[in-house]
Image: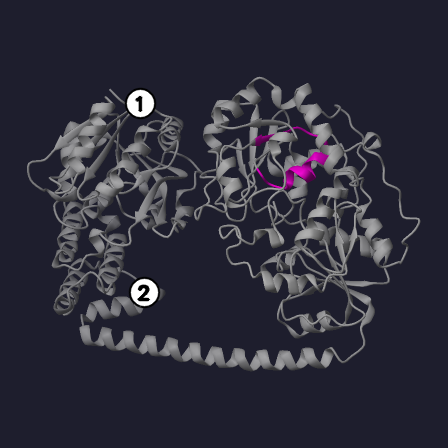
Amino acid sequence: MPRFSVIVPAYQVQAYLHACLDSVLAQSYPDLELVVVDDCSPDACGAVIDEYAARDARVRPVHLPENRGLGGARNAGMECAKGDYLVFLDGDDTLTPDALGSIADRIAETGEPDVLVYDYARTYWTGETARNRAAAELTEDGPAPFRLADRPGLLNVLMVAWNKACRREFVEAAGFSFPPGYYEDTPWTFPVLMSARSIATLDRVCVHYRQRRAGNILSTTSRRHFDVFEQYDRVFAYVAERPRLARWQPVLWLRMVDHLATVYGRRDRLPRGARAEFLRRARAHYRRYRPAGAPVPPGSRLRHTLIRLGAHRTWRTLRAAAALLRRARGLAAGLLKSVRTGVLRLHYRVQRCLPVRADRAVFAAYDGRGHGCNPGALEAAFRAYAPHVRTAWIARPEHRHTVPPGTRRLRPGTAAYWTALARAKYLIDNSALDPRLVKRRGQVRVQTRHGTPLKRTGLDLHGRPAAARGTDLAAFLADVDTWDYVLSANRHSTLVWERVCPGRYTTLEYGYPRNDVFQKATSADVSRLRERLGVPADAVAILYAPTRRDYRRAQPLPLDPQRLLRRLGPQFVLLVRAHPGHPGPPAEGERVIDVSGHPSVESLCLASDVLLTDYSSIMFDYANLDRPIVLHADDQEAFEAARGSYFDLRSCPPGAMARGEDELVDIFASGHWRGSRSAQLRAAFRERFCPYDDGRAAERVVRHVVLGESAGLPRITPLAHRHPVPSASSAPAHSPSVTLPQPYGPLTVTEGR
């Protein structure tokens, strides 16, 4: 008897069925049977099913002699199912990697519940992915299993069969089956949840719900959408036959009203001449099933009123009025914005006529994303070594909290923002300031950059459309012409910047200010950071930080964190730092910690014991810690073709290098990740790319640019005499607690990483 029976109905999904079946058969949890029901499909679905059955004994084909619809096909699959749990999956959807393994683990943890509800994400034909908006209802906090009365918010999750695993004995004992017609999930899901004696949740995306551009049944204009009334008749009849479920009638009534309003409001569902009839029937259902004294939520009163009245013309009139009101508001807002823009432009012109102030400096990182990176370290150094200069930081409202006390906050687009850009002598950023900036005589622009270049950048993106998507090279070169100084961490960076960012600036090959913290932190700082992140004291923390793939529209994580950890063993913890273009890990757990939104990537480096990355420039910064680095490069040919790099990592890697997951697991299992060969590779890498990051880079920049001390700057400490803080796994048991002066507010993840 298998653990799972995965039931897949197939009707006119030949283009998607291969991906669906592959996603099931490729699961790391193999104890399953795949019951695929050919619902007398007129396309090649039947042949595809037979091909898979011939290749894999776990596939059980069922061919129906006539079309029964989605509900009937699922019923046919249940009749053949032998698994402990029933899992439904539509033929055009897919299971995420390791979904069944996670479901099995959660079922075991929660004592074999009748129903396990898990999460899903919509995947669009454009390549975008969006997680279920009601994902918060699936939290695993609190007692489990439970009954629906303990977590009624579960009824806010999409009422479908394919986001639940149901215990087969529970389903058979209750006699549950799917009715014919559209919206067949409604009279299945509500009764199942209300009747279950034990329910559990899994806060993990297990299903990718495909949003097809065309061909979706519910997007087909038809009178079949009137089936929704019969489906709710079945739900309320089920409740009426069981007095103990009467408490759910008000909730079901509210859900019914929302559902009917949604069907009516979608222009692609009901035939033009049937809309008034649908609304009249909705009015009848509204009155028939409304519980006495049932309250109406304030935000739904208009919708309830229109359905209660059943006035098709009134609905159309109010809808047109609402559209007109939205348009009027949009025009008014546009006019107001134009006036405001004109006033601010005039204000900026006036401010540019006033003297430049030598005691003012403006900083920014990543288009106002918050305090951090090289500009953040320099802003702190300004306050330490040039206290006569008052600093201000450009931050969008959602990042204002990252700006440290004593630093003025500037919101982009305000009068104060334009005043600062017009009159401050020092302008420091790591990407690009406002394109409307007019640099004045007497102003000094410091471009800090944000990483040692491995991936091609600047003018080298010309001729690489995948990597240069959205890049305006003319605007980029115009910005370069405003640079006075460019920071460089090594000779390689200097040579690349001067070629791909040609300009009249001066290169300061002083090291990266953001890396100063690696030489100043203590073991006490490392322990404190690990404790805040929830890393166990005896665990080996792997910081997993992949970079963006320019050749892909969607950006899934190259490695599945949960599966990787299961293979590595219980002594490892994974800190997952997704690139801004990546979604986070599918689910967090005790040993998977999503740190994608953490404000300081430098803190994450300090808290970890080893870095796992691919082509990200974080490896150059991390090497300053002299801790192990492991590369996972399973798509190097595709990456080189789309983006290209300045040197072949295989010729000078910073540590062990894996071309696939099996090799990666072997590197950690054998200890090669921290062996002598890896240490030799890291030493050569540090010699080449970390010559100046000795903890005083920010001081050198401030003394040169602000104080004019071109001679007599702090000498570079050789690599052999540097002592970066060790990782927790290699630190002495009683390390001295020399508290590092808190530099200067939280740091922010860099775009180049």
Q: Where 596 sits versus 590, above or below?
A: below
Q: How far apart are marks 2 and 1 (CA)?
A: 46 Å
Instruction: Determine the image quadrant of residue 286.
Output: bottom left
x, y percentage for residue 407? 74, 60
Q: Which of 107 and 513 is in front in this view?
A: 513
Which image quadrant: the N terminus? top left
Kind of residue indicated by mark 2: Ser
Taking the spot 36% from the left edge, 31% from the top edge, the residue there is 103
Q: What stretch is highlighted in magenta?
A: 615-631
Work out whether residue 373 can be spotted: yes
x, y percentage for residue 185? 21, 46
Mark closest to the chain's N terminus, 2 or 1: 1
The image's mark for residue 31 is 1
Residue at the disc numbered 2: 300
**As drawn, is 497 to the left or to the right of 595?**
right
Instruction: Determine the image quadrant of residue 533.
Output: top right
**As drawn, is 734 to the left or to the right of 600?**
right
**As drawn, is 708 to the left or to the right of 142?**
right
Q: Which of 23 and 507 is in front in this view?
A: 507
Kind of residue indicated by mark 1: Asp
Taking the spot 49% from the left edge, 43% from the top edge, the residue there is 584
**As drawn, is 179 to the left or to the right of 686?**
left
Badge 1 marks a residue whose secondary structure is loop
Q: Nearer the viewer, residue 434 or 300?
A: 434
x, y percentage for residue 71? 16, 42
x, y percentage for residue 140? 43, 38
Which image quadrant: the C terminus? top right
